[in-house]
Amino acid sequence: MVKNKQTAIITGGAQGIGFAIARKLGRIGYNLMLWDLNKIRCIAAVADLQKQDIEAQAFEVDISSEDSVVYAFKQVLSQVPQIHVVINAAGIVGPTGIKTEEVSLNEFSRTCQINLIGSFIITKYSIRAMLPNDYGRILLISSIAGKEGNAGMCAYSASKSGVIGLVKAAGKEYADSGITINALAPATVMTPMVEAMDPIQVKYMTDKIPMKRCGTLEEVANISAWVVSSEASFNTGFVFDLTGGRAVY
Ligand SMILES: NC(=O)c1ccc[n+]([C@@H]2O[C@H](COP(=O)([O-])OP(=O)(O)OC[C@H]3O[C@@H](n4cnc5c(N)ncnc54)[C@H](O)[C@@H]3O)[C@@H](O)[C@H]2O)c1
């Protein structure tokens, strides 16, 4: 296999969707930088990848903190001359199974701080790192909840809608720069995040999928790998669908 040699940062890379995408890119030959708040799990994820002969490093990063993200970019750029790909898969589900009137401001803010403000911070500094090379691929993991809204999950839905607005605006701003900025909007995929949710809330989400099944981690990884590849050169400011037919736009 010819090694791809590109460097990819994947936030939320310690588990779930982030880890699945990391493994896929690692198999293609990318040099991986896994960023996650959970240092222990991130180190374990890197060890797992290294056992498969995949080049990877673990970084403890809080995507909702500008200082933490700026510091992590500096660390990466002290080791490699170019960052080709950034995928933001870090996120939290926030309050679920609860109506809007009962949601506390703290929980709503915290969900938006990580999912939306974190996406903004990652996007801003990814663009800065990529502009000097006139090349980059930024992929933010949004959600079908951001398009349609999931009842019982107003904070999550609002934060993921914000991510869609962010890629649509930023994608246009940098359309002629060589940097593409896209989002992925999956329906339910079984990960530790979903396993920790109330089964009634999960049933509500999966019942809406016309294919009558959840998406798989492989399906998320496959489409993500294409969106961040150099082949995906005429796609920006777009929200890619992965919903088994649930999305109507
Ligand atoms: N699983 C699904 O059904 C589904 C569907 C649509 C969208 N998504 C989105 O995909 C992304 C990944 O979801 P998942 O299901 O793999 O979740 P997960 O909980 O299994 O993994 C999320 C990872 O993000 C990390 N993380 C959380 N907050 C962080 C922070 N502030 N800074 C850095 N890392 C942080 C966690 O430690 C964890 O390793 C999320 O943005 C989620 O909203 C998931």
Image (spheres, rainbow, N blue to C red):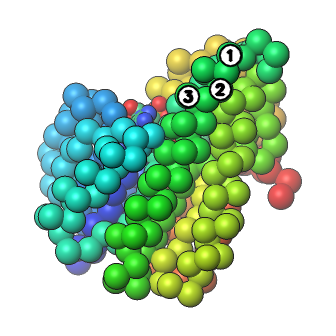
Q: Is residue 242 above or below residue 30?
A: above
Secondary structure of the residue carrying numbered label 3: helix
Q: Are marks 2 and 1 in contact (CB under 8 Å)?
A: yes
Residue shown at 58%/44% (left/top)?
A: 116
Q: Is residue 26 visible?
A: no
Q: Disc 3 marks which amino acid?
A: Arg
Name the residue tied to disc 2.
Answer: 108
Tell me the element at label 1.
Answer: loop
Instruction: Say which quadrant the N terminus sits in.
Output: bottom left
Q: Looking at the image, can residue 91 be seen? A: yes
Label 1 and label 3: CA atoms lie apart by 10 Å
> Of label 1 and label 3, which has the lower sequence position?
1
Quadrant in the rendering for residue 27: bottom left
Is 36 left or right of 53, judged from the image as shown?
A: right
Q: Looking at the image, which residue sits at the far right?
A: 248
- Residue 96 is situated, as x and y percent measured from the top left of the image, at 67, 19
Kindly indicate whether the residue at mark 3 contacts the one at mark 1 (C-beta within 8 angstroms).
no
Question: Is 121 placed left or right of 162 in the picture?
Answer: left
Q: Residues within 10 Å of mark 2 (few under 14, many from 20)?
A: some
- Quarter of the image containing the C terminus? bottom right
Tag 2: residue type? Phe
State the image coordinates of residue 152 (x, y, percent, origin top left). Answer: 77, 22
